[in-house]
Each structure stands twice: as C-alpha cells, then as structure tokens.
C-alpha cells in the first residue's frame, strides 16, 4: 500500500487495485472548432494541464497501473444522444453537425480523438460515453470490478462537468476516488476551484485531492 499526501487526509492505495481515469482529453474540448468552442468557451485554457498529465501518465504506466481513457462520444446515428442534450441552448454547431474537425462529438471523427500527447497505448481501456458521467450507459463499472479495482485517480476535462460527474458516480459505486488537481481544468477557473474544494470538504464527501507530483512521490518518484 502506498500513501499519497492528499486532502483532507492521506490517500492509502495499492497501484494493483487502482486505475488512473483520464476523462475526455479529446480534441473536441481542447482544440478550437470542437464541441467546447461551439458552446461559447475559450478552449485555450485547457491545454495548460497537458504537461502535468503527461508526467502522471508516464509515472503510472511505469508503475504498471491500469489506465482508463474516456471520450464523450455519440453513435453516428445519434441514437444515444437524447434530444434534450442535442437541443439544449444555442450552440454555433450542435452534436452531430459537421464542423472543422468532423461531426461534433461523434465517435470516430477527428475531433473525437484523444489528443496525441495523451494517446492511449495497447492494453489501456478506452470508454466511449454518451453522458457526462463515465459510468452512465457504459461498461466501466463491470470492467473495473473484473480487474479488482477499488481506487480511482481522476484527471481530465472539464473539472465540474464530466470529471466531477464521473467522480460522484464512482463514489456512489463504492470507489475511493482522488482528483489530481493539476491534471484537471475547466473553462471557468472559479468552477475548478469550487469543485476541488467541494470534493474534499466534509471529510472527503466525494473523495480526496492531491497534485500529480504528490502521486508521483507516493510511487517512489517514478
Ligand atoms: N461543457 C463542458 O464543460 N464539458 C462537457 O460538455 N463535457 C465534459 O466535461 N467532458
């Protein structure tokens, strides 16, 4: 068992029963012309976490830990996209519309791919999820249970939308979750700050928070 310096108290974990879950580090959110920008966001804010996330990913792979990547992705026929999701608000392009990186938020399109710097490698799990949470309408829980995973380390985008939703879903399913604060980002800095604080409030009501460096230190500085 290894202990990471974390808040609200140290996080006790065994890399063999822990997975690193990187949420939606895909071009649709991080690069111009994707879903994030169609919603009116300044997407340039998100790329700041890429170096810290790369360091954590390299250390975690070096420690032999399981890696899960998710993508917010819909089937080409949009049969898994509720009209309420597609019709919400007034985006410049809607889910399924043709954009500069292919159809917005559709599986297999260029914009739906995970950015090159964090691309999955053989043996890692890639989950296409139609919702904000990684457990909704996916096989993630079964895949993790089959591998004896009890602890989850979360990074990715955006902090208060898909990352927080996934972390809350995991918490209700009995996982001990830790949010890597310098490996997650929001289009709204105040929302990131609030999310990090609310996760660890009330004695870790949703889970723990730590930096990528603190995790790497717990792995022996890998
Ligand atoms: N809009 C926004 O902040 N996020 C999303 O729509 N999806 C994810 O967070 N991945």
Image (cartoon, helix red, strand yellow):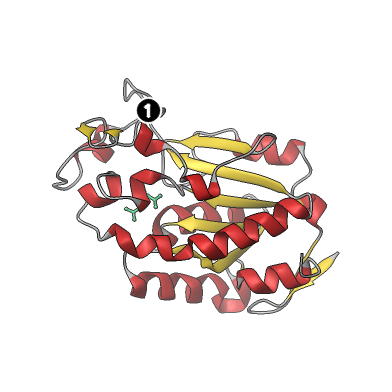
40 relative to 220, above or below: above
**67 vs 81, nearest the viewer:** 67
Q: Is residue 35 visible?
A: yes
Q: Position of residue 95 (x, y in %)?
A: 26, 35
210 relative to 132, above or below: below
Left or right side of 173 for 116: left
Instruction: Name the residue located 34 percent from the left edge and 44 percent from the top edge.
Output: 28
Q: How dense is the environment of label 1, judged by Cα within 10 Å: few (below 14), some, or many (20 and up)?
A: some
Find numbered disc 1 in the image and state the secondary structure of the residue it sits on: loop
Left or right side of 82 for 23: right
Q: How many marks?
A: 1
Work out which quarter of the rendered image holds the N terminus and state it: bottom right
Q: Position of residue 68 (x, y in %)?
A: 62, 44
Q: Position of residue 114 (x, y in %)?
A: 47, 42
31 relative to 209, above or below: above
Q: Is residue 206 visible?
A: no
Any atom of ligand 1 within 8 Å of the CB at mark 1? no
Q: Position of residue 52 (x, y in %)?
A: 56, 65
**Where on the picture, by quarter, is residue 206?**
bottom right
Instruction: Name the residue located 59 percent from the left edge and 33 percent from the top edge.
Output: 139
What residue does disc 1 label? 80
Instruction: Name the residue located 58 percent from the left edge and 69 percent from the top edge.
Output: 205
Instruction: Name the residue located 52 percent from the left edge and 50 percent from the top edge.
Output: 117
**212 vs 192, nearest the viewer:** 212
Question: Which residue is most to the top?
Answer: 77
**Where on the picture, by quarter, is residue 35?**
top left
Left or right side of 46 for 201: right
């Amino acid at each position: 068992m290894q202990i990471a310096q974390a808040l609200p108290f140290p996080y006790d974990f065994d890399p063999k029963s822990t997975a690193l879950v990187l949420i939606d580090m895909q071009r649709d959110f991080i690069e111009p012309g994707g879903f994030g920008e169609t919603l009116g966001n300044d997407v340039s804010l998100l790329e700041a976490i890429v170096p810290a996330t790369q360091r954590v990913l390299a250390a975690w792979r070096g420690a032999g830990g399981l890696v899960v990547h998710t993508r917010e992705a819909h089937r080409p026929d949009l049969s898994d996209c509720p009209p309420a999701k597609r019709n919400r608000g007034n985006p410049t392009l809607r889910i399924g519309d043709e954009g500069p990186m292919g159809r917005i938020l559709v599986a297999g399109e260029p914009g739906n791919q995970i950015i090159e710097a964090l691309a999955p490698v053989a043996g890692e799990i890639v989950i296409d999820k139609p919702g904000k949470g990684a457990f909704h309408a996916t096989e993630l829980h079964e895949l993790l249970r089959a591998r004896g995973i009890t602890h989850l380390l979360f990074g990715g985008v955006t902090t208060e939308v898909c990352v927080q939703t996934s972390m809350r879903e995991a918490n209700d399913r009995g996982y001990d979750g830790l949010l890597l604060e310098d490996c997650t980002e929001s289009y709204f800095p105040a929302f990131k700050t609030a999310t990090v604080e609310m996760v660890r409030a009330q004695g870790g009501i949703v889970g723990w928070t730590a930096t990528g460096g603190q995790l790497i230190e717990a792995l022996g500085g890998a």
